[in-house]
Amino acid sequence: MPVKENDFTVMTMNLRFGLADDGDDSWQNRKHLFAEVLKRYPPGFIGVQESNHFQTGYFSRKLLDHNSIGLYNPSKERWQSNPIFYHNTWKCLKNKHYFLSATPDVESKMSGSKWPRQCVIGLFQNASHRIIIANTHFDFAQSVQVKSAALVIRFLSEFPKDCPVIITGDFNSNPGSKVHAVFQADGFAETFDNQHSTTFHKFTGEETLDHIDWILYRGKIKIIRKKIITDSFFGRYPSDHYPVMAVFSKIGQRKS
């Protein structure tokens, strides 16, 4: 997928937790496949979910022309992070890490949530262009998802209001759901709106009804191309989720 000089690529990818007991699909047997994905589809920005600290380290070593933001806690073996990797042609002007809870600045989880879910947000600049990128992973209960969406929108209010915004994530919900409606009401479109396909396939490569990995966007940017990366490598899939990517036009809003 060639990208023109004035366009930029965004990818979202759930890595599948590296300590999961996945047998033949364990992290050690599939981690090299992510290098193949990154080589075939080089991203400008990539939001990853379910990243254990050694998985984050692996991506850092493979993405040598990228920097990253996002809190992770290597002292906790089962910690899952949502870092954002961004190409070094972009500069991060501001970034914050939040927990999706009533106390977003300290490790915590919302009532009804299985895990302490998180959101990472960065303000990036390339020459005179700026953009806000957020990356998150929602829990399973619909009521928790709706509250989480409201929190992400609130967190975004702490960033410049005149910038285009892109949100990557695993939302554990399909477009058309109540949580999708919350984002739509705030001006967001989903990249594959009305063209839904499988993103969660459980390492099978088979079609499912689960389009739960989204790239949401709003503001003065235009989507050029989009793709759900269903590629297998050497007969194996990198994750139980397909990566999703989109190419956007150069940012329409310029820094004054």
Image (cartoon, rainbow, N blue to C red):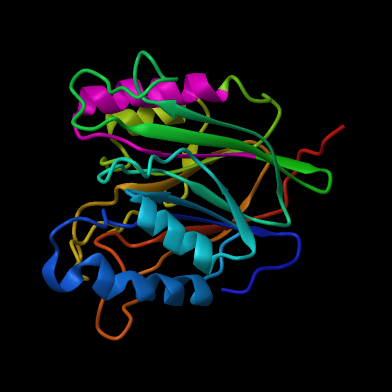
Q: Is residue 242 left or right of residue 8?
A: left
Specify the quadrant that holds the N terminus.
bottom right
Q: Is residue 235 left or right of residue 125?
A: left
Magenta segment: does it hold 247? no
Nearer to us in this view, 189 or 77: 77
Specify the quadrant that holds the C terminus.
top right
Q: Check the image and report above or below for 233 versus 17.
A: below
Q: Residue at x 32, y 42 (%)?
A: 175
Q: From the top left corner, tell me how far across and down residue 136 is, in percent.
A: 41, 38
Q: Main secondary structure of the magenta part?
A: helix
Residue range (magenta): 132-156
Q: From the top left corner, tell me how far across and down residue 88 is, in percent.
A: 69, 57
Q: Is residue 13 visible?
A: no
Q: Residue at x 14, y 64 (%)?
A: 22
**Residue most extreme to the right:** 256
Count up the numbered dots.
0
Q: Check the image and report above or below for 211 versus 95.
A: below
Q: Check the image and report above or below for 143 versus 82.
A: above
Magenta segment: does it hold 152? yes
